[in-house]
Image (spheres, rainbow, N blue to C red):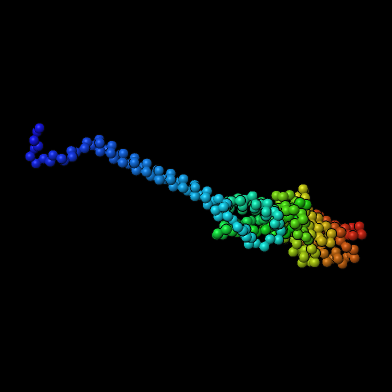
Amino acid sequence: MRAPRRGARPNARQPQPARFRRFAAGFAKLGLVVVVVAGIGGIGAGGVYGYRYLSAPDTFPLQSVRFDSRLEHVRQADLRVALDPLLGQGFWGLDIAAIRQSLETLPWVSTAKVRRIWPATLQVTIREHRAVAQWNDDGLLSADNIVFRPPAETWPEGLPELHGPDGRAKEVGEHYREWGPRLAEVGLKLQSVTLDARESWRLELVDGVRLELGRHETDERLRRFINALNDLRARSDQDLLAVDLRYPNGFAVRWADGSGDNN
């Protein structure tokens, strides 16, 4: 057996080759990655389980639905149809977006807002359409110029009647709001505005008088009629039946007794 050299320590660890050191470092990193991935997987599995637990109807059951709006036209039966299929989840499992969308399919609902109130309440705020006129024979026109079609038995009474293509509802509504006050200034009440298939405008007053404005210069023609109204009233004790304003410089009048007059 060889004697150790002077100054040497018999039990000292010899330096490791560079290749071995790189291998050991790589293995340590691999072990760290395995631990981290396993941890993330555990968190993901726990998150899924936690969501399912919180969403279960029996964990945090929904106990009440609170409506913060005073509803005049939306019926309770329609609300139940819209909400019941979507309320079977627990408090945290409610699909708020789906509930809102379902409510906004109801014909009288303009917008709906839905939110959770801890610990067991669903708060619903509904904005109803405000009907300003009957649109054609099957719908209503809102103050926002939106055509909607609720059941006829829910329509308000006494609405003016507007007629025209659905794509022109805003235009017809704006003319009604413009012409109505002008006629009211001379004691006439506008009941109906019609834009027919030939792009011709026709007005009807509450007393049945029909005004034919035609396709062009409608504002000027209505002004001409209003300016001549006092003269027409003084000319005959008969009631007006119809006035055709589609002439370039005048109009034709038909009286209730069937007689006519040109101006």
Name the spot of residue 218 as percent of width and height, x first: 75, 56
Between 231 and 153, the residue placed more toward the observer is 153
Left or right side of 103 for 230: right
Residue occupying the far left of the picture? 6
> For the point 9% across and 41% down, which residue is it?
7
Residue 187 in view, yes or no? yes
Between 133 and 120, the residue placed more toward the observer is 120
Name the spot of residue 11 as percent of width and height, x first: 15, 40
Residue 93 in view, yes or no? no
> For the point 40% across and 43% down, which residue is it?
38
Q: Is residue 202 above or below residue 34?
A: below
> For the point 77% across and 67% down, which residue is it?
185
> For the point 75% across and 59% down, which residue is it?
156
Task: State which quadrant residue 189 falls in.
Answer: bottom right
Tell me the quadrant of the picture where the N terminus can be found. Answer: top left
Between 248 and 50, the residue placed more toward the observer is 50
Between 61 and 176, the residue placed more toward the observer is 61
Tell me the quadrant of the picture where the C terminus can be found. Answer: bottom right
Left or right side of 129 for 41: left
